[in-house]
Amino acid sequence: MSTYDWPEPQGTVEEWRRLFHAAEAFKAAAPWDWMSEDQLFAVQNPETGEVGFCSITGEIGEHYALIAYLGEAGLGTYLTALRGMKYASSFLEEHEHGMMLFETPQLQASFEQRERITELDWQIVQDIKVRIRGRKLWPLFRVFSPVRLPWHITGPQVRFLTTLLEQSLIVAQAQQRGEVSISPLIEIATLPTTLPLILRELEGGEWVFKQQVFSLQYPAIASANPLSVEDFADLRRKLPLKNDEMQVHLALLAMPVEEGDLPPYLPYTLLVVDSHQGIVLDAKLLLAYPSLEDLWPQVLPALLALFEQWEGRPKRMLIASERLYNLLAMPMGQLGIKLSRVQHLPELEEAYLDLENWTKRQ
């Protein structure tokens, strides 16, 4: 259990009480009984103008929560993950897109079993002297920053999450009464450039409903910082081409690492497996520090270091990840390595599951 203090700036006693009261009202109304998680709508933060794109989950009896994806970039990452999970053709592809949810900035108010509540969460309940009804579902408030551990919320986040809960319940009840119509997301085989949604906005001191078209921002992969033509030529001379095949995957690991300011980071592993022997050639941890954009330039140097240790370069490389394929297509081509994107990599899947099980035991 965490022993850290609440992050600054901290919420006041009254701000926390209002948040808990909003959460209790939301839980008592149980809007997941008539709302599905793909009925998205928007709520604007009256303090900053930031928009939270809201999803009410729990329709199938799992993870009762209000999730607000933050900003049009947060919405774009969420839709990318959603599409990827729906249309994934392999375990690795589905898992990669599922992990993209941890790359999506979001605020969550969820309702959990008592054992999920930390000492720090319980300390707030005691300090502000609120009563939790229906103790099988305790309110838990978290902020998700890209590739960081879900963390305790600051004072401004307390206020915005309170607004999100209050306004989301108004939207959900208006939907139930037929006063507004929130359609489930349309087919997202092709990601849209714009998305019309119902918006709750504070205007002239009054909360109003609006219909607004949002422009989506989708995640982009930074350049791998490829070497010069001369550098690639030197590598081809130094590292002979071997008649071997490697399987490569980059995945998020649920193994928090403290680096710099809290909250802890969730590292990635660059996993490389020999296709013919099924043995793990490398499992290198890469940290998206200080931001997700700092992850991508680390991939190519990590592979080149493996080639140098291996004293050669493989003739073929197999990849299931669309992001990793796009990142490595050019540099691997410069090295004379045939890069193929395939659906299934059984040897790598087995190695990844072994690694994931190992992290759970730590």
Image: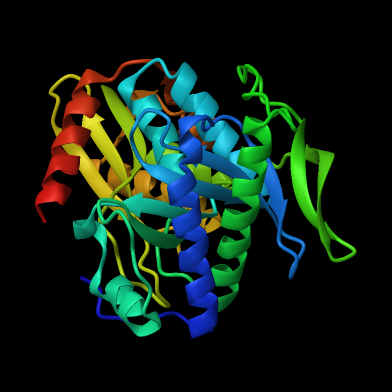
Q: Nearer the viewer, residue 140 or 72?
A: 140
Q: Position of residue 151 (x, y in %)?
A: 40, 65
Q: Is residue 220 visible?
A: no
Give me the residue at 42% from left, 26% from top. Answer: 337
Question: In the rendered view of the protein, which quadrant contains the C terminus?
Answer: bottom left
Give me the residue at 55% from left, 55% from top. Answer: 293
Q: Is residue 39 visible?
A: yes
Instruction: Name the outermost residue toward the right.
Output: 204
In the rendered structure, the answer to whether residue 229 lies left or right of residue 299 reads right
Give me the residue at 54% from left, 84% from top. Answer: 9
Give me the residue at 40% from left, 15% from top. Answer: 89
Q: Position of residue 158 (x, y in %)?
A: 54, 70
Vertical comparison of 213 with 161: above or below: above
* Quarter of the figure with residue 15: bottom right
In the rendered structure, the answer to whether residue 224 lies left or right of residue 119 reads right
Instruction: Name the outermost residue toward the left.
Output: 361
Q: How is the image coloured?
A: rainbow
Q: Nearer the viewer, residue 31 or 319?
A: 31
Q: Position of residue 339 (x, y in %)?
A: 44, 23
Q: Position of residue 70 (x, y in %)?
A: 62, 53
Q: Nearer the viewer, residue 18 or 356?
A: 18
Question: In the rendered view of the protein, which quadrant contains the N terminus?
Answer: bottom left
Looking at the rendered structure, the number of numbered marks drawn on it comes to 0
Q: Nearer the viewer, residue 119 or 340?
A: 119
In the rendered structure, the answer to whether residue 20 lies left or right of residue 218 reads left
* Quarter of the figure with residue 259: bottom left
In the rendered structure, the answer to whether residue 322 lies left or right of residue 345 reads right
